[in-house]
Image (cartoon, grey):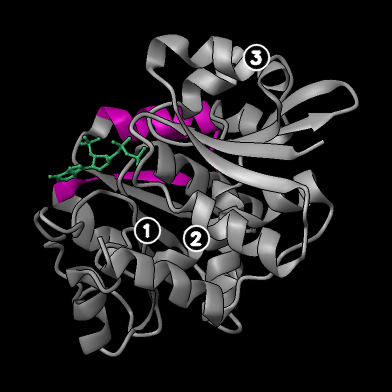
Amino acid sequence: MIRKVCVIGWPVAHSRSPLIHNYWIETHGIADAVYERLAVKPEDLAATVTRLGAHGFIGANVTVPHKEAAFAALSRHDAVAKRLKAVNTIVTTAEGLEGRNTDGYGFIANLKDRAAGWHADKGPAVILGAGGAARAICAALEDEGAPEIRIVNRTRARAEGLVRDLRLKAGRIYAGADAAAALKGAALLVNTTTLGMKGESEVTLDLDPLPKTALVTDIVYTPLETGLLRRARDRGHQTVDGLGMLLHQAVPGFEAWFGVRPQVTETLRALVLADMAGK
Ligand code: ATR
């Protein structure tokens, strides 16, 4: 029997998950596996997720805008998905379908991969934004031992909701105007907002208060070097782009579905970059 896995989104045409997983399927010589795109309207999401097996799928990835709805549709979750109330990976286990969330894992693995010696316990982390991606990243940074997590968001109430829902122990909220204070003494700066994405305006935050030793990263990867990363590089900061988070978040799902832990390599990175250049 063919082991089918899919990425569920709406729209889903832009997703690079099929490229990544089919590359690993090929390089590992897994002859009986295939990874597909599945465009699912919001009103059909719950039925699709709960009947994955009936449609011939052993697992799935879930992307925008379905991560929270997929959490709600499933009755079993791992600890991370439970904390985030969002699912990006679905696995068939002996007990049935289980929702997991590997976004935070992907974020941390990317930094460890691209910034040798980096560790979350080096100092306070500043997070720009308070959406779904920020939630996954804050939880992962706390789990990794970040001593303080400073959230800078345009809408203060949303940042408060994040700290409350995740029960962040060392979460501090900074309104947009206090951003300079947030940067003082920080060891990590992360952009999780859509600012800097192709066609959007850039992050305009003044980086002067940020110590030169701070690592700067962006989860936006189109373009690969956002205005924020360029400004940080010009100031002498070490920077890490967001493409690796996408690649690394795919690793635990592939391992759970097919029993092999795949590698994030320069070849895979180049493959995804070439695909992005062609679009
Ligand atoms: P995701 O789930 O990918 O994280 P999201 O939930 O839509 O996306 O969150 C987007 C984040 O980008 C939010 O923190 C949003 O700020 P608000 O909470 O104030 O809406 C932030 N964002 C988007 N556009 C922005 C802009 N023009 N200026 C500042 N922040 C912006």
> In the rendered view of the protein, which quadrant contains the N terminus?
top right
Compared to 276, does 173 lie above or below?
Answer: above
Q: Quick one: label 1, few (<14), some, or many (20+) residues within 10 Å?
A: many
Stretch of the chain drawn in magenta: 157-176
> Can you name the residue that lies furthest to the right here?
94
Q: Mark on residue 50? A: 3
Disc marking residue 230: none
Q: Is residue 220 above or below residue 267?
A: above
Q: Residues within 10 Å of mark 2 (few under 14, many from 20)?
A: many
Which quadrant of the view contains residue 2? Answer: top right
Residue position for label 2 = 245
- Picture quarter with the C terminus: bottom left
State which tag comes first along the sequence, 3 or 2. Answer: 3
- Measured Cα–Cα span from mark 3 to mark 2: 27 Å
* Secondary structure under the numbered disc 2 in the rendered image: helix
Q: Nearer the viewer, residue 242 or 63?
A: 63
Q: Which mark is residue 219?
A: 1
Queried on whether the Cβ of the residue with tag 1 lies below 8 angstroms from ligand 1, the answer reads: yes
Q: Quadrant of residue 169?
A: top right
* Residue at image coords 60%, 56%: 22
